[in-house]
Image (cartoon, grey):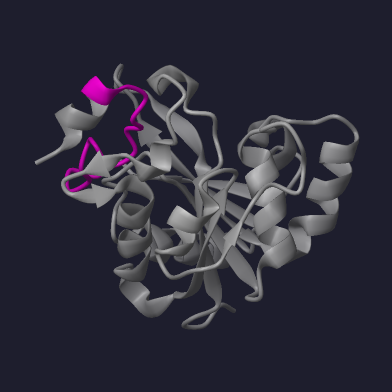
Amino acid sequence: MLSAGSVTGLVLAGGRGSRMGGVDKGLQNFNGTALALNALLRLQLQQGGWIGDAMINANRNLAAYEAFGVPVWPDSLDGYAGPLAGFLTGLERCETPYMLTVPCDSPWFPLDLADRLVRALQTDEADIAMVSAPESDGQLRPQPVFTLMSIDRLESLSAFIQSGGRKIDAWTDQQRTILVPFNTPADDPRAFFNVNTREDLRALET
């Protein structure tokens, strides 16, 4: 059973930002706050008290990220290997029994994210709980960068990556994974929208 503080929140900010002209996306301004810092603040506001620690996965401008006051870890794999490399880095550094990943570029992820994933994970006795949310066509689809996982998945993930695997869903399909729907009338339709361009960023600002 999970208890208060038994989850570490990991902000994924290690990408190239190629669709935004190569800028460091996590440091882009959103309503006066860097996107990565916004994500950290939302992790700290999570309902249920599950989040005990937080850290950031970033691959450049490390001093700027360290100014946010939490540990910052670059990928343990070379070459901007994608979110799964961030998962691996986080699991290697995580000091709580569970880890929750969120990307830096979805600034409105819900404040009950951790609570709903934890409850689903416990109910189904799963190793991984992943968000499933409606996309622009209204269809529910997995959102694999919003994932709660047990740290005992480290060995499995390491073996998967060493064998050449890079896709999150290809790995999570091998685990006891449950999809958790976020499609109630009270759920914000913007909750899992990710920022790919400066136009996206401005559109999500309030």
The residue under the point 17% across, 49% down is 32
Q: Residue furthest bottom?
A: 4
Report the side of 197 relative to 77 (left or right). left
Give the residue drawn at x 47%, y 28%. 17
Q: Nearer the viewer, residue 30 or 142?
A: 30
Q: Quadrant of the C terminus?
A: top left
Residue that appears at 25% across and 42% down: 29
Quick check: 15 left or right of 133? right
Res 153 seen here? yes
- Residue 47 on the magenta segment: no
**In the image shown, does 136 or 87 lie closer to the viewer?**
87
Q: Give residue 160's quadrant in the image.
A: top right
User: Most extreme residue toward the left, as rendered?
Assistant: 206
Q: From the viewer's perspective, is residue 135 above or below residue 161?
A: above
Q: Residue at x 53, y 71 (%)?
A: 7
Q: Is residue 178 left or right of residue 112?
A: right
> Does the magenta portion include 196?
yes
Number of callouts in the render? 0
The answer to whether 22 is drawn above or below residue 87 in the figure is: above
Q: Position of residue 134 (x, y in %)?
A: 33, 30
Q: Quadrant of the N terminus?
A: bottom right
Residue 114 against residue 178 in the figure, above or below: below
Q: Magenta stretch mostly in which secondary structure? A: loop
Does residue 55 appear left or right of residue 199 in this picture? right
**Camera sees residue 176:** no
Residue span colored magenta: 184-199
Picture coordinates of residue 116, whole percent (x, y): 40, 60
The relative height of residue 196 versus residue 91 in the rendered view (above or below) is above
Residue 90 at x, y percent in the picture = 65, 58
Residue 96: % across, % down: 63, 76
